[in-house]
């Protein structure tokens, strides 16, 4: 089955989805994106992703490519056309195409909107059984990480470094403290308490994080929002990450230090279970 993608109002076979070489997303990374999980053919935390998209667009003074209702319909149509049961929808908005100039285009240009699906094993991801390994690496990103821009070179380099060291994710470190993963939020568990960095311009406000913190408090699991050091992580009882494409993922090694005896611990297993229950509804 040939994948159907969405490009500026049209549904096309993936080989026909094309954008201009003058697109500012391509030339300046002048674009924002969202990745939304799909489980049982339904969107997970969709409203949260759309709220964050609205904020990203506003922070960059970028226009909406269409209405919210049209965006919702487009997501559903991509699921339908691709018969997507489980995976993600990637969508990207850029400021549009204009002759190259650092300034915003003088004439009004239409924002570019593209989206596509990827089939993925989210619920029965085998990594969730074994847990994954992470390294730490310096955080080389800009100062507005709260905006979900497509400027992903530093995260890409970090993730590649992790893969080359036999790990699946890199936790980025700034001023001696973990900010977040290259494509996920970071957590440790100590004495039954979950520790994760508080929201600021230094990290992305994860939609999965938001849902998880709500669920955790409903289940009486204590959360402490503060930054932690890699050394604290080495000595933690448990560690994990969250993202739309991994949900709640146990971490069993940080920089070669085994966490919790190298097995996913009880708190992360419980949190994954309650998040999956919610996501599957
Ligand atoms: N990344 N922090 C960063 C830097 C991220 O890129 C992501 C998501 C998150 C988690 O946010 P959420 O829970 O809303 O997915 C945190 C997506 C999945 C990606 O780039 O593929």
Image (cartoon, helix red, strand yellow):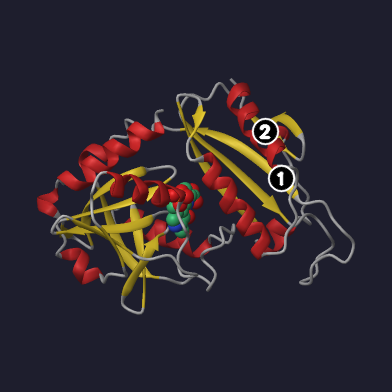
Quadrant of res 102: bottom right
In the image, residue 250 sits, relative to residue 15, either above or below, namely below
| Position in image of residue 144 (x %, y %) | 54, 69
Visible residue check, residue 14: no
Q: Which residue is mark 1?
A: 113
Q: Nearer the viewer, mark 2 or mark 1?
A: 2
User: What residue lies at 45% left-to-right and 24% top-to-bottom?
Assistant: 40
Residue 89, given in percent of the width and then of the height, sits at 55, 37
Q: Residue furthest right?
A: 107
111 relative position to 153: left or right: right
In this picture, residue 52 sits left or right of residue 77: left
Q: In the rendered image, which residue does mark 2 sit on?
A: 74
Q: Is residue 37 visible?
A: yes
Helix, strand or loop status at disc 1: strand
Q: Camera-side residue: 51 or 7? A: 51
> Disc 2, disc 1: CB below 8 Å?
yes
């Amino acid at each position: 089955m040939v994948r159907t993608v969405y490009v500026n109002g049209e549904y096309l076979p993936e080989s026909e989805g094309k954008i201009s070489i003058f697109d500012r997303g391509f030339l300046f990374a002048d674009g924002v994106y969202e990745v939304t999980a799909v489980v049982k053919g339904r969107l997970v935390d969709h409203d949260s992703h759309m709220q964050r998209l609205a904020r990203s667009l506003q922070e960059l003074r970028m226009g909406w490519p269409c209405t919210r209702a049209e965006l919702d319909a487009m997501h559903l149509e991509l699921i339908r056309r691709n018969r997507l049961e489980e995976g993600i929808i990637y969508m990207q908005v850029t400021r549009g195409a204009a002759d190259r100039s650092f300034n915003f285009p003088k004439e009004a240009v239409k924002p570019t909107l593209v989206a596509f699906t990827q089939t993925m094993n989210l619920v029965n991801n085998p990594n969730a059984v074994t847990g994954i390994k992470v390294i730490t690496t310096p955080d080389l990103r800009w100062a507005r990480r709260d905006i979900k821009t497509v400027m992903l070179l530093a995260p890409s380099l970090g993730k590649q470094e992790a893969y080359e060291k036999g790990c699946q994710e890199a936790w980025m470190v700034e001023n001696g403290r973990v900010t977040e993963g290259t494509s996920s939020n970071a957590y440790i568990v100590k004495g039954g308490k979950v520790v994760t960095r508080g929201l600021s311009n230094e990290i992305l406000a994860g939609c999965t994080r938001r849902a998880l913190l709500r669920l955790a408090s409903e289940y009486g699991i204590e959360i402490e929002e503060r930054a932690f050091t890699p050394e604290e992580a080495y000595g933690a009882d448990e560690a994990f990450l969250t993202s739309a494409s991994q949900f709640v993922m146990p971490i069993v090694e940080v920089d070669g230090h085994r966490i919790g005896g190298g097995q996913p611990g009880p708190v992360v297993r419980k949190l994954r279970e309650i998040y999956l229950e919610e996501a599957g509804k």
